[in-house]
Image (cartoon, rainbow, N blue to C red):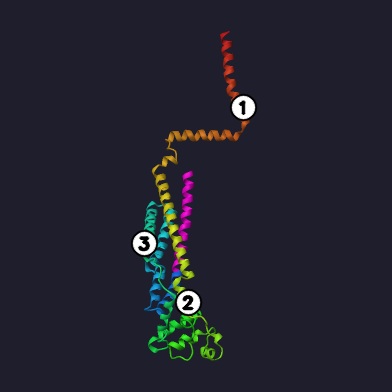
């Protein structure tokens, strides 16, 4: 009975851990896809600079194809673990344990291999000005779109200040993506009438803060550590469940009594039925039966005395 309760508890814990694997893997894939869009924009603006190398070093563990593949594989492994736990199948549970061990080793090796602090300084932001010279040219429409997207999303203008557009290009006013309230010709109107309608902060500090780490990256790191801890706990519980199931099948006599022959089983059944009827009849009938049994020897002794006389 105690072993049966322990197995039931282990199965419930493994159900919960497999559900956590599904949820955390889905969250990792979603946050990684979210970060990847912003990362592609930053890599386009910082191409051929030290900022590009720093961004790759910072975000490669989060969007590395190995990590994405591992998360997808972990969802499948969690499904196999759920089925093995549900059916108490030793083969599926063994495969589940081995897969978790391999995934954990791959994650640990990837984290150690890709971990490196980026060496970037604020002075490196000045190199972004070289990426402004081709803005608006027909051959660099992709770069123009990237600048507009980044300035709109991060609410910034230029590298240090919006005057960088006037300095590095032949434009007389900044792009319309620098306006807080965008509409065609808003930057021209703001430049000649009200500069407060333009974003006052440059995009250089925004890119520097992005490279140093964002909240999304911190969430990914937390999820990665949580998945690793959950995998260690799941492997320990799976080993315990495997031992309990194997021990229960190896020694069934500890849980169930030895089978009786058919004749003995009939005798036991009849005895149990008689005892059950006796228990239902109450204490009065038992007392009467006992008095009748004790009175018979007394009558037999009286007959023997009369015969001897």
Give residue 100's position: percent from left, percent from top.
39, 58
Q: Pick whichever of labels 3 and 1 is earlier in the sequence.
A: 3
Does residue 184 appear anywhere in the picture? no
Residue of label 1: 288
- Residue positioned 39% across, 59% down in the render: 104
Q: Is disc 2 placed on a helix, strand or loop?
A: helix
Magenta stretch in the rendered image = 1-29
The one nearer the camera, 20 or 250, is 20
171 over 252 or under it: above or below: below
Give residue 234's position: percent from left, percent from top.
43, 55
Q: Nearer the viewer, mark 3 or mark 1?
A: 3
Q: Residue reaching furthest top?
A: 309
Callout 2 touching callout 3 (CB < 8 Å): no
Residue of label 2: 206
The one nearer the camera, 134 or 259, is 134
- Residue positioned 47% across, 77% down in the render: 205
Instruction: Name the image quarter holding residue 212.
Output: bottom left
Q: Nearer the viewer, mark 2 or mark 1?
A: 2
> CA–CA distance between discs 2 and 3?
31 Å
> CA–CA distance between discs 2 and 1?
99 Å
Instruction: Name the image quarter holding residue 168.
Output: bottom left
Quarter that holds the C terminus: top right
Q: Is residue 281 left or right of residue 169?
A: right
Q: Is disc 1 placed on a helix, strand or loop?
A: helix
Q: Pick whichever of labels 2 and 3 is earlier in the sequence.
A: 3
- Residue positioned 56% across, 12% down in the render: 304
Give residue 277's position: percent from left, percent from top.
56, 35
Q: Nearer the viewer, mark 2 or mark 3?
A: 2
The one nearer the camera, 117 or 308, is 117
Residue of label 3: 109
> CA–CA distance between discs 3 and 1?
83 Å
Callout 2 touching callout 1 (CB < 8 Å): no
């Amino acid at each position: 009975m105690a072993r049966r309760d322990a197995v039931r508890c282990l199965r419930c814990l493994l159900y919960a851990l497999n559900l956590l694997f599904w949820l955390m893997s889905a969250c990792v894939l979603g946050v990684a896809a979210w970060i990847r869009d912003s990362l592609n924009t930053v890599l386009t603006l910082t191409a051929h600079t030290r900022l590009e190398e720093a961004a790759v070093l910072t975000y490669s563990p989060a969007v590395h194809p190995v990590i994405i593949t591992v998360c997808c594989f972990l969802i499948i492994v969690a499904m196999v673990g759920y089925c093995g736990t549900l059916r108490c199948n030793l083969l599926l549970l063994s495969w589940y344990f081995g897969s978790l061990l391999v995934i954990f080793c791959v994650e640990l090796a990837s984290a150690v291999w890709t971990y490196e602090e980026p060496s970037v300084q604020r002075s490196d932001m000045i190199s972004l000005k070289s990426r402004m010279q081709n803005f608006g040219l027909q051959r660099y429409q992709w770069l123009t779109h990237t600048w507009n997207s980044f300035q709109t999303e991060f609410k910034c203008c230029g590298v240090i200040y919006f005057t960088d557009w006037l300095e590095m290009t032949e434009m007389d006013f900044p792009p319309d993506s620098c306006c807080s309230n965008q509409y065609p010709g808003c930057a021209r109107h703001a430049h000649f009438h009200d500069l407060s309608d333009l974003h006052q902060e440059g995009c250089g500090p925004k890119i520097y803060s992005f490279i140093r780490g964002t909240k999304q990256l911190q969430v990914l790191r937390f999820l990665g550590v949580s998945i690793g801890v959950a995998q260690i706990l799941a492997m320990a519980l799976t080993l315990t469940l495997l031992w309990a199931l194997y021990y229960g099948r190896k020694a069934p006599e500890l849980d169930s009594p030895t089978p009786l022959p058919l004749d003995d089983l009939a005798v036991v059944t009849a005895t149990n039925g008689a005892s059950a009827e006796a228990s239902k009849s109450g204490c009065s009938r038992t007392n009467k039966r006992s008095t009748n049994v004790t009175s018979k020897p007394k009558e037999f002794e009286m007959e023997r005395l009369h015969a001897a006389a």
